[in-house]
């Protein structure tokens, strides 16, 4: 099965995708992680993308297509697309090259999304993720695993989050309408415990 998870930042797409990947073996493809991997390796694509991400902007489609194409080519046993397509141009690209069976729209208020995302932290050395709301390090500012410094990413500051939320609504409403008209859209409330959200997704997918 090929599914798409969609929703504003902080709605839990990544968390739910990882659980689905573990339980069903579908490959989790997220453009955000693919772009950050390129940034860490300091590839040409990564350095270009970083300029947009640091300003709270979404990376232009022509760069996103380049990394998505390779990832889709290696996904043979089912796929979980996380946050792509975000706009109609990306949707047109996807429809020409791929088939989506179901689309899960994770619904969360803007206020809750800002609270969740602005609380994110990660280790500069081992890259372990933390969240000050529900997954704090044992010692403030110090990684539990390697003792490295824990920081907030530039794109997790409130001003950057607000820009992305606004752009999500501006760009993605047509994508949501398209999948709704196709009969593929499933609405899931994302302001609930992780296990409840996962159960609701699995039930809706009938798997």
Image: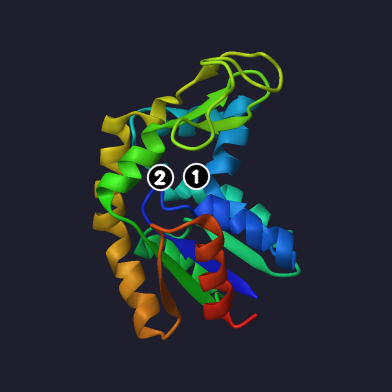
The quadrant in which the N terminus is found is bottom right
Decide: marks 2, 1 in contact (CB < 8 A)?
yes
Picture coordinates of residue 6, whole percent (x, y): 43, 61
Residue 152 drawn above or below residue 36:
above
* SS for dot 2: loop
Give the residue displayed 52% in from the left and 64% down from the top.
196
**Location of residue 91 in the rendering, given as x and y in whole percent from the top left corner:** 43, 66
Residue at which label 1 appears: 63
Q: How far apart are marks 2 and 1 (CA)?
A: 6 Å
| Residue sitting at x 31%, y 33% | 160
Residue nearest the observer in this picture, 86 or 124: 124
Q: Along the horizontal axis of the image, is 182 left or right of 76?
A: left
Location of the C terminus (image quadrant) = bottom right
* Mark 1 surroundings within 10 Å by alpha-carbon count, few (fewer than 14), some (14 through 19), many (20 or more): some
Residue at 66%, 54% in the rendered image: 71
Q: Residue 60 carries which label?
A: 2
Q: Can residue 46 be seen in this view?
A: yes
Q: Considering only vertical position in the picture, is 84 above or below 57? A: below
């Amino acid at each position: 099965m090929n599914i798409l998870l969609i929703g504003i930042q902080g709605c839990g797409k990544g968390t739910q995708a990882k659980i689905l990947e573990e339980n069903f073996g579908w490959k989790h493809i997220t453009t955000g992680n693919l772009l950050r991997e390129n940034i860490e390796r300091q590839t040409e694509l990564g350095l270009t993308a970083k300029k947009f991400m640091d300003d709270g902007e979404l990376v232009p489609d022509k760069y996103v297509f380049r990394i998505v194409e390779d990832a889709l080519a290696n996904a043979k046993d089912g796929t979980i697309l996380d946050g792509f397509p975000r706009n109609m141009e990306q949707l047109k690209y996807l429809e020409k090259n791929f088939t989506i069976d179901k689309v899960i729209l994770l619904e969360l208020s803007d206020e809750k999304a800002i609270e969740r995302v602005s609380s994110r932290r990660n280790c500069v050395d081992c890259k372990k993720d933390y969240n000050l709301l529900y997954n704090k390090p044992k010692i403030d500012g110090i990684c539990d695993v390697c003792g490295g410094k824990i920081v907030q990413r530039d794109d997790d500051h409130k001003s950057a989050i607000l820009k992305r939320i606004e752009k999500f609504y501006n760009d993605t409403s047509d994508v949501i309408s398209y999948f709704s008209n196709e009969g593929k859209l499933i609405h899931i409330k994302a302001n609930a415990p992780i296990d409840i959200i996962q159960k609701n997704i699995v039930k809706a997918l009938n798997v």
